[in-house]
Image (cartoon, helix red, strand yellow):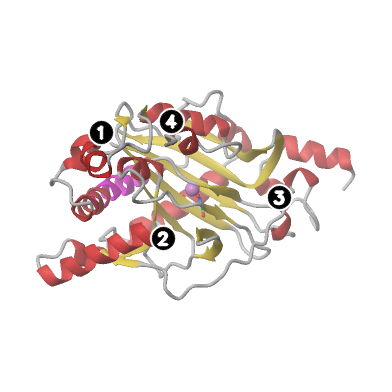
Amino acid sequence: MAPTATAALVNDLCVKDLAQSSHLKSIPSQFTFINDSKGSESDSLPVVDFSMLVSHNVDQRSKALLDLRKACEDWGFFVLTNHGIPETLMKAIVDVSLEFFELPEEEKRRYEAKSASDPIKAGTGTANAANHKILLWRDFMKSYVHPNFYCPEKPQHLREIVSEYTEKSRLVLRKLLQGICENLELEEGSIDEAMNLDSCFQLYAANFYPPCPQPDLTIGIPPHTDHGLLTFLIHNGVAGLQIEHNGVWFNTNSPKNSILVNTADHLEIFSNGRYKSVKHRAVVNTEATRISVVIANGPAPDVIVSPSAELVKRDGRALYAPLKYIEYVETMLSNQYGGKGNLECLKIQE
Ligand code: OGA
Ligand code: NI
């Protein structure tokens, strides 16, 4: 392809169309993000069995609490099984998210973000590395779904499926946070209250990663941490999420119908650094289109998040400065994945 044609493609099209454009053998240079997409394998990724966490059997519940605790402390990541969200609903949200990306360009363009506070945003990924704009190998759509519900009008059924899936996710979220509260030896209900979880913020994000001729020269999403408390991720069976653990990138594989959960920035803040927000990234592959559906679960938008007073008392000092949650989210969304993480900015030096 002549350079001018490539530039036009990159400016005008989503990655989906670029990937489908005839005979794409190499990626346009604006996508260059050198990495080794082959992560390490681990046979010991933490698993938390949700049915045991909510069980009335004391031994089972203690075991699940311990698994949850170790997962939060060691990895900041776990595979959640037996969570009770119906398989049909999980499949429906992945399928309808794919349908969104298959809509005509004009329809998707309606949601091109004009500002960070737009509740619905669609587009193709960019990141800044040292003031240098890099294009990412993914298209996305994000919408705020709780406490106020926004969602694109099309495809048909998107709204009802997203609404049902995110409502069920909130129930799972609250049980997990109850467990985390107990593991942190805090008074029952204290996370719920401090984060005002009745109005918890949820963002639904769908990511579309088409096959890529040179996966090691580009990336779906560069290394980052998420805002919020816990992020839930499911996908269409094509792996691509990698988690950093002890300086090594690990592939995550998820048994069918499980949810991949990672700890996020506001759990690190609230826990006064006990539970680190885990760094992760999305890699792409030559073979298959990958769809991921991500639900970011945070405190209520107007909560000013700071470390738990009780934990600060135990530790003798707060390690993070307070900040209103929605401000944090919108600064992060406008910076995309560039520069210094917001969390770094809130750390209080000794
Ligand atoms: C995200 C994210 C990873 C993936 O959307 O924040 O980390 O595998 N996605 O899609
Ligand atoms: Ni993420």
Q: Which residue is mark 2?
A: 75
Residue 328 is tagged as 4
Label 3 to label 1, Cα distance in Å? 38 Å
Q: Amino acid at mark 2?
A: Trp
Q: Check disc 1 and report its element: helix, strand or loop.
A: helix
Label 2 to label 1, Cα distance in Å? 28 Å
* Mark whose residue sits in front, 2 or 3: 2
- Dot placed on the residue nearer the N-terminal end, 2 or 3: 3
* Mark whose residue sits in front, 2 or 1: 2
Image quarter of residue 202? top left
Horizontal arrangement in the rendering, residue 9 relative to residue 2 (left or right): left
* Mark whose residue sits in front, 4 or 1: 4
Horizontal arrangement in the rendering, residue 252 relative to residue 22 (left or right): left
Does residue 76 appear anywhere in the picture? yes
Dot 3 crowding, Cα within 10 Å, few <14, some 14–19, many 20+: many
Q: Which residue is mark 1?
A: 199
Pointers 4 and 2 in contact (C-beta within 8 Å): no
> Start and end of the magenta stretch?
160-172
Label 4 to label 2, Cα distance in Å? 24 Å
Task: State the quadrant of the C terminus.
Answer: top left
Dot 2 crowding, Cα within 10 Å, few <14, some 14–19, many 20+: many
Image quarter of residue 85? bottom left
Q: Amino acid at mark 3?
A: Phe
Q: Which residue is mark 3?
A: 33
Q: Amino acid at mark 1?
A: Ser
Pointers 4 and 1 in contact (C-beta within 8 Å): no
